Amino acid sequence: MSDWRIVTRPAYRAVGMKWEGTFQEVPELKKVIHQMRQRVDELEHAVNRDVLLGLSYHVVENGFAHYSVFEVTDDQKVLDGMVEIQVPEWTYMYTKHKKGENVVQTYNNLHQWLHDSEYQALKEAGVTYYDPYLPIKHEYYPADQDPDDPHFDILIPVVKES
C-alpha cells in the first residue's frame, strides 16, 4: 500500500444514527447511511456537513456496530432517533480508498501493512472484539461519493507495539 501515514486525531463528539447487525444484514446499514445523509441539515452544529463518518466496531459476533454520524460541537443536541458517540484522541493508520479499487483488497493491503509494521490495531480495554485484525474501522465518506464506486478515507486506531 503506497499511500499511508500515522496521524493523531484529537478527541471529538459525533451525533447520528447507530446500526448493529451481522454481515448478512449490511443492506439495512446502507439504508441507515442514506437516512443520515438526508438528516444532516437537522444538525445545526455539524463541524463539516460534507463528510459523513462511518465508525465501525466489531463487537457483534459475525457483524459489527456502526455509527453513521457527523462530527458536532458541544452545542449540538442529540435529536430523535439519533445517538451520540465520544471518540477519544487516538493515533491512526490513515489511508485512502480510491474510486475503481476493490474495497476488500484495500483492507487486505491495510491488514498486511499493519502486520509488517511496528503497530498493532487498538483494542479498548474491557471490550470484546470479534475481528482480531481490524477491530475498529473509521471511514470518512465525502458528500460527492458514488455509492457504487466509493472513495473514502480509512482511519484504523493503532498503538505502537511495545
Image (cartoon, grey):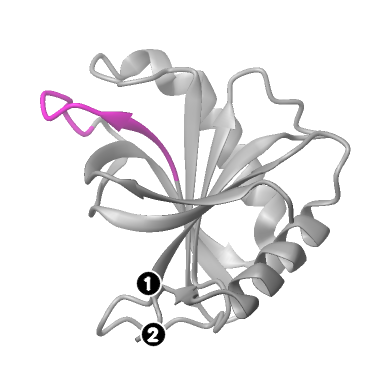
Q: CA distance from mark 1 to mark 2?
A: 17 Å
- Mark 2: amino acid: Thr
Q: Earlier in the sequence, mark 1 or mark 2?
A: 2
- Indicate whether residue 35 is drawn in magenta: no
Could you classify mark 1 by the number of other residues whose Cα lies within 10 Å: few (under 14), some (14-19), or many (20 or more)?
some
| Residue 13 point in image, percent of width and height | 23, 40
Q: Quadrant of residue 141?
A: top right
Q: Is residue 3 above or below residue 159?
A: above
Residue closer to the observer: 161 or 137:
161
Q: Quadrant of residue 83?
A: top left
Which residue is labeled 1 in the image? 159
Q: SS class of the residue under badge 1?
A: strand
Which dot marks residue 128? Answer: 2
- Indicate whether residue 75 is drawn in magenta: yes
Q: SS class of the residue under badge 2?
A: loop
| Residue 162 point in image, percent of width and height | 34, 86
Residue shown at 85%/44% (left/top)?
Answer: 101
Could you classify mark 2 by the number of other residues whose Cα lies within 10 Å: few (under 14), some (14-19), or many (20 or more)?
some
Residue shown at 37%/72% (left/top)?
Answer: 159
Residue shown at 49%/31% (left/top)?
Answer: 52
Determine the residue located farthest toward the left in the rendered image.
75
Q: Quadrant of residue 100?
A: top right
Q: Is residue 40 left or right of residue 73?
A: right
Residue shown at 76%/56% (left/top)?
Answer: 106
| Residue 92 point in image, percent of width and height | 43, 56
Q: Is residue 115 above or below residue 52?
A: below
- Mark 1: amino acid: Val
Q: Is residue 106 left or right of residue 96?
A: right
| Residue 97 point in image, percent of width and height | 71, 43
Residue closer to the observer: 12 or 80:
12
| Region in magenta | 68-78
